[in-house]
Amino acid sequence: MAAYAGADLPPKNIKIGIIGGTGIGSPDILKSPQHRRVTTAYGDPSGPLVEGEIDGIQVAILSRHGQTHTIMPTNVNYRANVLALKEAGCTHLLVSAACGSLREDYAPGDLVILDQFIDRTTKRAVTFYDGLEGHLKGIAHFPSHEPFCPKMREILIATAKSLDLKCHPEGTIVVIEGPRFSSKAESRMFQKWGGDVIGMTTFPEVILAMELGIPYASIGIVTDYDAWKNVEDHSPVHVEMVTKTLEQAGSKAINLMRKVISEIAQFDWTEIHQENKNRIKTSVFGGFAAME
């Protein structure tokens, strides 16, 4: 594999990669969907890419947990997923993530435009730069102070407002390894840390997109209040609760995605494209010479 598969596509050739989490990612939103199986230097992605158009804009959808939700968060091949979409020509990643709320005012059914994360995972491959043969070369230390693309977030927030959706403009997500949900003590600890929501998939996905120079934004779909509330006030999170809320709220996220895709395509990404490329130059020891 070349040292960098990354940010040399003309920024005006927009193609949106959608990574759908639990309950999101149906190819029904695409015009003339085509399924295509691919592989990468990091293995196979979670499933086939489903490619088509939304309002004349090229889109590729990948179901994070597989087409029938058979891959638990720890076992998702995040590197293959992100790279497969990059190699398919995707210039942006727009994703969804089911999450529990750590705040009273972030209610089930609300949307959250994530802006920060706290990583509590322990078992995942977290970088493309792992030193293995055929993988990206160099030692990478990427800045994580602003992990989500600010411009994509700005577009998402404005579009959600125009659609009159209940959408929180920022949110820090605590990413746990799973597959179990939190204990009450953990949930309350995460509140004290400054977490707004909790999930299992945002990391390392967001940083892997950064390593390839891809603007990335995530729509959090609040499904529950995790485990911090007293049981007499609210039932602790369980799978049936999550699934039921996603059935009710998932359409809001899909509608937001459909609308925001055309907004993304209208923006000139040249400057941001160059900024992302420059960030790679300044973040990798011993790797950039091979990128050129």
Image: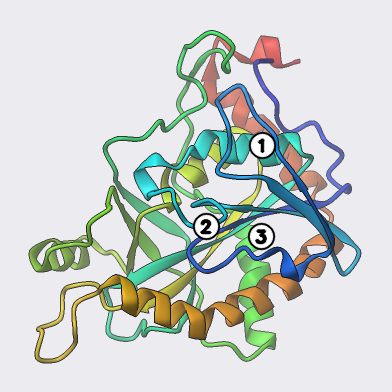
Residue shown at 86%/60% (left/top)? 57
What residue did someone put label 2 on? 68
In the picture, which quadrant includes the N terminus? Answer: top right
Query: Could you tell me if the residues under marks 3 and 2 are in contact, i.e. CB atoms within 8 Å?
Result: no
In the picture, which quadrant includes the C terminus? Answer: top right
Asked whether, in this view, residue 177 is left or right of residue 134, the answer is left
Mark 2 and mark 1: span between their CA atoms? 19 Å
Q: Under tag 1, what secondary structure?
A: helix
What residue did someone put label 3 on? 151
Mark 2 neighbour class, 10 Å CA radius: few under 14, some 14 to 19, many 20 or more: few
Name the residue furthest right. 56
Q: Under tag 2, what secondary structure?
A: loop
Mark whose residue sits in front, 3 or 1: 1
Asked whether, in this view, residue 36 is left or right of residue 116, the answer is right
Amino acid bearing label 2: Thr
Residue shown at 51%/60% (left/top)? 21
Mark whose residue sits in front, 3 or 2: 2
